[in-house]
Amino acid sequence: MLDLYDPAELLERSLRPTQIVTRNLSVTQAWGSRIWNERDPHDSTRRRWQAVQWWSYHRPFWDVLGSWEQPELDHVEDLDLDHAAVRDAAAALVRPLR
C-alpha cells in the first residue's frame, strides 16, 4: 500500500498535500492515474501498489483507502437515519439528518 502520509512518497511524486485532498476531480484523477500506472521495479508486468492511503478532506485524522483489489465481503448492514454510524458521521461532518 502506498502511504501518502509519508512526505518522502509525496516528494517522489512531486505532490503537495493540498493536491491529495483537493475537491478537484481532474487533479485527484491525475495523481491517482500516475500511481495506478507505477510498476514494480523488479517486475514491470506487475503494478507497484495494490492500494493507496491518504487523509480525509473532512477530517484529517480519518484515513481514506483506495484499493485496486476486490475485497472479500465480510458482512452487510442496512443503513438508515437511525443507524449509529450514520448519526456519528452526520455529527462529525456537521450535517443535518433529514
Image (spheres, rainbow, N blue to C red):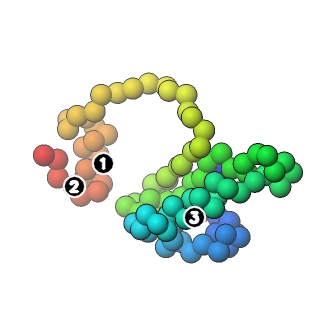
Q: Would you place residue 41 above or below residue 79 in this image?
A: below
Mark 2 closeness class: few <14, some 14–19, many ≥20 residues within 10 Å: few
Provide residue 13's location: percent of width, then percent of height.
67, 69
- Is residue 83 or residue 65 the one in the foreground? 65
Say the numbered circle drawn on residue 95: 2
Sequence-wise, the earlier of marks 2 and 3 is 3
Q: Which residue is mark 1?
A: 89
Q: What residue is at 30 percent from the left and 54 percent from the top?
A: 92
Q: Secondary structure at mark 1?
A: helix
Rounded to the nearest angstrom, the CA distance separating label 2 from label 3 is: 29 Å
Q: What residue is at 41 percent from the left and 68 percent from the top?
A: 24
Q: Amino acid under label 1?
A: Ala
Sequence-wise, the earlier of marks 3 and 1 is 3
Q: What residue is at 21 percent from the left and 55 percent from the top?
A: 95
For the residues bearing labels 1 and 2, Cβ distance under 8 angstroms = yes
Mark 3 closeness class: few <14, some 14–19, many ≥20 residues within 10 Å: some
Provide residue 68's location: percent of width, then percent of height.
59, 43
